[in-house]
Amino acid sequence: MSAILETHDLVVAYGGNQALAVPHLAVARGELVGVVGANGAGKSTLVNSLLGWSRGRPRITGKVILEGQDISLLPSFARVRKGLLLIPEGKLIFGTMSVAENLASASIGAVPDGRKAYSVEEIYDLFPRLKERRGHLGSQLSGGERQMLGIARALRLGPSALLLDEPSIGLAPRLVATVLQTVRQLADDGLAVLLVEQNVSAAIEVVDRLVLLERGSVIAEGPAATMRDDPRIAEAYLGAHAA
């Protein structure tokens, strides 16, 4: 499968301190790739570098490729226009708008060939709970519902690749499973999805491949079924499942 989102020799450094070094990372159409690691492992730095965000003026080298085009020198807004969309940890919804209004405000009309903007009806099929709550304000939603709405707004924009940053934070285990299963469905429908997650036990159940970051470096990667038995995953993150 050809990659929709890809990096080559991506390095982020602050002064003389290297914060991230990812020789190669690729996400294909219809693939869900998980990037996991403890706090401080470099997950947020990876997301920021993919989107062109530069907190603290780091030195970023290497390439970020989206649908075969080098976007490394493009500003963040231009990367978004090309379809690289992030669902941040904060969910990014409008609290003073209803669910229906949040979805309507996310529409950009026609999208480039090869990209699909989900209709409101398709959104409600994915997230029946949002249909039930369509008249409620964003501020009245639960954490899980806000996460669903954040994903839904991104889908309305017709992403080429979708980045999710810690979607499980603050959610009850049941809601974590619901949200991640929907993310899995999006990949099955043909979307390229990069899931950045600290909840390894939840992520490994839905991803195709898993990448383990530690101190800014990739120390292990492979198919989820194989990574489940990797001692670096099993002992550090899966607890009783390590056996």
Image (cartoon, rainbow, N blue to C red):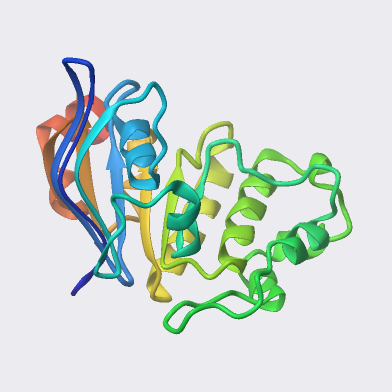
Instruction: Classify residue 183 as left or right of residue 102.
Output: left
Q: Is residue 96 left or right of residue 157?
A: right
* Residue 44 appears anywhere in the view: yes
Q: Position of residue 127 (x, y in %)?
A: 65, 64
Q: Is residue 239 among what the camera can see?
A: no
13 sits to left or right of 9: right
Picture residue at 73% right of the left edge, 63% below the top: 103
Q: How many marks?
A: 0
On-image quarter of the C terminus: top left
73 shown above or below 113 = above
**Which residue is painted at 70% across and 66% down in the image?**
128
For the N terminus, give its image quadrant: bottom left
Please provide percent x and percent y for residue 230.
11, 39
Please name the residue shown 41% across and 26% down the image: 55
**Looking at this view, is 60 or 207 the one in front?**
60
Residue at the extreme right of the image, as rendered: 135
> Looking at the image, which residue sits at the far bottom?
113
Residue at left offset 19%, top offset 73%: 2
Vertical comparison of 40 with 59: above or below = above
